[in-house]
Image (cartoon, rainbow, N blue to C red):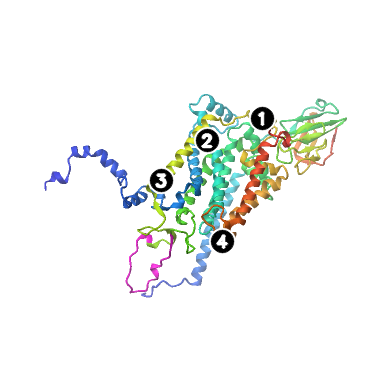
């Protein structure tokens, strides 16, 4: 063979440049068989978050409703629009409101970006809450997914706190008084309440220090915390054996094999069997190989489902942002609270309870609720009815949960529509 | 020399491991807690709690005037004066002056002329603050020192 064949010339290299660059980035062609479909999932950085195969239950829209995915995609939209808004925003009591007006009046697409950010934020709170309902009502928080449920509850709290800190930033009347009321509630916590309020506000009242603190929390601290928690939340889905699903006849989740190998325990001198990495994984995982089961390849089934949910979420936000403008009230006037002064809708249930008793409504009841949620998977240990909506075996748990959820919704509806000046009952009709 | 098989840690070694672990994580925890002090401001930028409200003559006998910036209501009767807080004891909104006393726009708390709760979720009465006369003849209110309800300063 000649040297030329072994070392292609410059012309050949240039000719093949595009395809060489392409194939150096994307190692696999579009998959044509099962082996290549599997390879796609673990050779691509972004796709390797996915398992090679997923159970059909994971893909049934009627089972998950895609609520977790929608929440995540809303968070992505929030990060992108939030970073763009940061280019024009100044966390100063003398400038913040003017910057809001500039977004509306002079910045190209400014009002649209703000709308997207505001409506995605509302949407994310709603979707995370609904996701929690879905997971509870399908019994998906049970063993071995207890800890991921706990992470989910913490994610809900961080989402609410993110939304709350963002609420102050426009520095309008709505923002100022909602935060005044909200932080006063924190002041009712026993022993540390007043200290906590002072540290949160950086002062005795809501002012420049509070605006700066809320800004830093909103754009740096809380998004970082949320990102980390989301990463662990996703990772745990895989490590806990994928999404929950109905059990097979033998009392195990269909499609999951339990494996516990102790290679180190082999007696000395015995023939040593070599295991692949898979062999050392403990606990439940989705089985692979030519075993008849109810799972399908992630490529393209799961990926197409995800793409569909993403496109749906983004289009919904785009349409809503085109049709409705994010509210902006009068600039802050610390002497004249609006009447009635209302918190954002998802806190109006709290505010309604607070109008009966500040401590019980603002601290006592919410704390008990959160503790109940956190404790649920450790108290409710039965394995029956996992993976099905409203399973008969879970009638008691679901009834308790739905009662509390509906109560919360009723309080929110009363606070939103039935409360007028001086928080007196009014008819919205 | 040859007996280097992995034996169970001796009690002393175990204790030392525990002690050093405790020291390491203990000091890390202490450092983290001491950093909390960082977040508590030593001074604030808010206006002074001790302030002048002008001459006594600015408040004719029988008037009740709300000073919005300082969040106090100045009560003048014959030859005595008092300062009542207008910050709602419920959740910190500013109460408005009403015929019957005070009323809060946020959650509907109501107070009588002396600041006693007459309705709504407010847990306690509005605070009364120390009133004094400065040497230059101006009336000073000190929001740092609360006084008992009904304590008037006699001019």
Q: Which residue is mark 1?
A: A333
Q: Is residue B15 magenta?
A: no
Q: Which residue is mark 4?
A: A382
Crowding at dot 3, Cα within 10 Å, few <14 / some 14-19 / many 20+, comes out as some
Q: Position of residue A236 (x, y in %)?
A: 47, 54
Circles 1 and 3 on the same chain: yes
Which is in the foreground here, disc 1 or disc 3? 3
* Foreground of the two, B70 or B121: B121
Q: CA distance from mark 3 to mark 2?
A: 26 Å
Circles 3 and 4 on the same chain: yes
User: What count of labels does the image hold?
Assistant: 4
Dominant secondary structure of the magenta stretch?
A: loop
* Foreground of the two, A342 or A292: A292
Q: Is residue A267 magenta?
A: yes
Residue A264 occupies which quadrant of the picture?
A: bottom left
**A387 up-or-down from A326: above or below:** below
- Quadrant in the picture for the C terminus of chain A: top right
Q: CA distance from mark 1 to mark 3?
A: 50 Å
Label 3 chain ID:
A
| Precedes in sequence: disc 3 or disc 4 | 3
Which secondary structure, mark 3? helix
Q: Which residue is mark 2?
A: A117
Q: Is residue A268 left or right of residue B72?
A: left
Circles 2 and 1 on the same chain: yes
Crowding at dot 2, Cα within 10 Å, few <14 / some 14-19 / many 20+, comes out as many
Q: CA distance from mark 2 to mark 4?
A: 41 Å
Q: CA distance from mark 3 to mark 4?
A: 33 Å
Q: Which residue is mark 3?
A: A303
Circles 4 and 1 on the same chain: yes
Which is in the foreground here, disc 2 or disc 4? 4
| Precedes in sequence: disc 1 or disc 3 | 3
């Amino acid at each position: 063979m000649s040297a030329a064949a072994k070392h292609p010339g410059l012309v050949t290299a240039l000719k093949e440049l595009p395809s060489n660059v392409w194939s150096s980035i994307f190692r696999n062609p579009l998959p044509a068989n099962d082996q290549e479909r599997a390879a796609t999932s673990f050779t691509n950085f972004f796709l390797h978050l996915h398992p090679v195969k997923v159970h059909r239950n994971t893909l049934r829209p009627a089972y998950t409703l895609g609520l977790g995915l929608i929440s995540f995609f809303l968070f992505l939209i929030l990060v992108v629009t939030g970073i763009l808004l940061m280019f024009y925003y100044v966390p100063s009591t003398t400038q913040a409101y003017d910057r809001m007006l500039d977004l509306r009046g002079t910045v190209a697409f400014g009002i649209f970006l703000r709308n997207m950010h505001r409506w995605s934020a509302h949407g994310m709170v709603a979707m995370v809450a609904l996701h929690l309902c879905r997971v509870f009502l399908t019994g998906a928080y049970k063993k071995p997914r207890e800890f991921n449920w706990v992470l989910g509850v913490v994610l809900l709290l961080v989402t609410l706190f993110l939304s709350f800190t963002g609420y102050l930033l426009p520095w309008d009347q709505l923002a100022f008084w909602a935060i005044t009321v909200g932080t006063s509630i924190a002041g009712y916590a026993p022993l540390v309440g007043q200290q906590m309020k002072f540290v949160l506000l950086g002062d005795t009242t809501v002012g420049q220090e509070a605006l700066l603190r809320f800004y830093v929390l909103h754009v740096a601290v809380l998004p970082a915390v949320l990102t980390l928690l989301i990463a662990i939340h996703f990772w745990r889905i895989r490590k806990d054996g994928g999404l929950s699903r109905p059990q097979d006849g033998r009392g195990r989740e269909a499609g999951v094999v339990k494996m516990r190998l102790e290679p180190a325990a082999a007696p000395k001198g015995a023939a040593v069997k070599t295991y692949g990495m898979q062999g050392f994984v403990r606990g439940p995982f989705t089985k692979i190989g030519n075993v008849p089961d109810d799972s399908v390849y992630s490529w393209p089934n799961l990926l197409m489902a995800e793409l569909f949910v993403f496109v749906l979420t983004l289009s919904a936000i785009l349409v809503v942002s085109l049709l409705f403008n994010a509210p902006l009230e009068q600039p802050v006037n610390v002497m004249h609270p609006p009447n009635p002064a209302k918190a954002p809708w998802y806190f109006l249930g709290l505010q309604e309870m607070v109008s009966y008793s500040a401590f019980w409504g603002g601290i006592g009841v919410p704390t008990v609720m959160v503790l109940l949620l956190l404790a649920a998977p450790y108290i409710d240990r039965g394995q029956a009815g996992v993976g099905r909506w409203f399973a008969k075996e879970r009638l008691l748990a679901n009834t308790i949960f739905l009662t509390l959820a509906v109560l919360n919704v009723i309080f929110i509806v009363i606070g939103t529509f039935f409360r007028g000046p001086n928080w007196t009952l009014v008819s919205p009709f | 020399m040859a007996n280097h098989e992995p034996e169970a840690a001796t009690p002393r070694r175990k204790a030392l491991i525990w002690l050093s672990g405790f020291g390491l994580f203990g000091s890390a925890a202490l450092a983290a807690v001491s950093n909390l002090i960082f977040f508590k401001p030593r001074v604030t930028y808010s206006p002074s709690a001790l302030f002048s409200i002008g001459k006594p003559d600015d408040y004719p006998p029988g008037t009740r005037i709300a000073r919005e910036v300082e969040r106090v209501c100045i009560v003048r009767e014959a030859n005595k004066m008092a300062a009542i807080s207008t910050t709602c004891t419920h959740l910190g909104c500013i109460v408005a002056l009403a015929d019957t006393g005070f009323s809060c726009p946020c959650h509907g708390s109501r107070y009588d002329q002396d600041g006693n709760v007459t309705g709504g979720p407010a847990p306690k009465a509005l605070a009364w603050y120390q009133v004094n006369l400065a040497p230059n003849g101006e009336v000073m209110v000190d929001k740092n020192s609360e006084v008992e309800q009904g304590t008037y300063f006699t001019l």
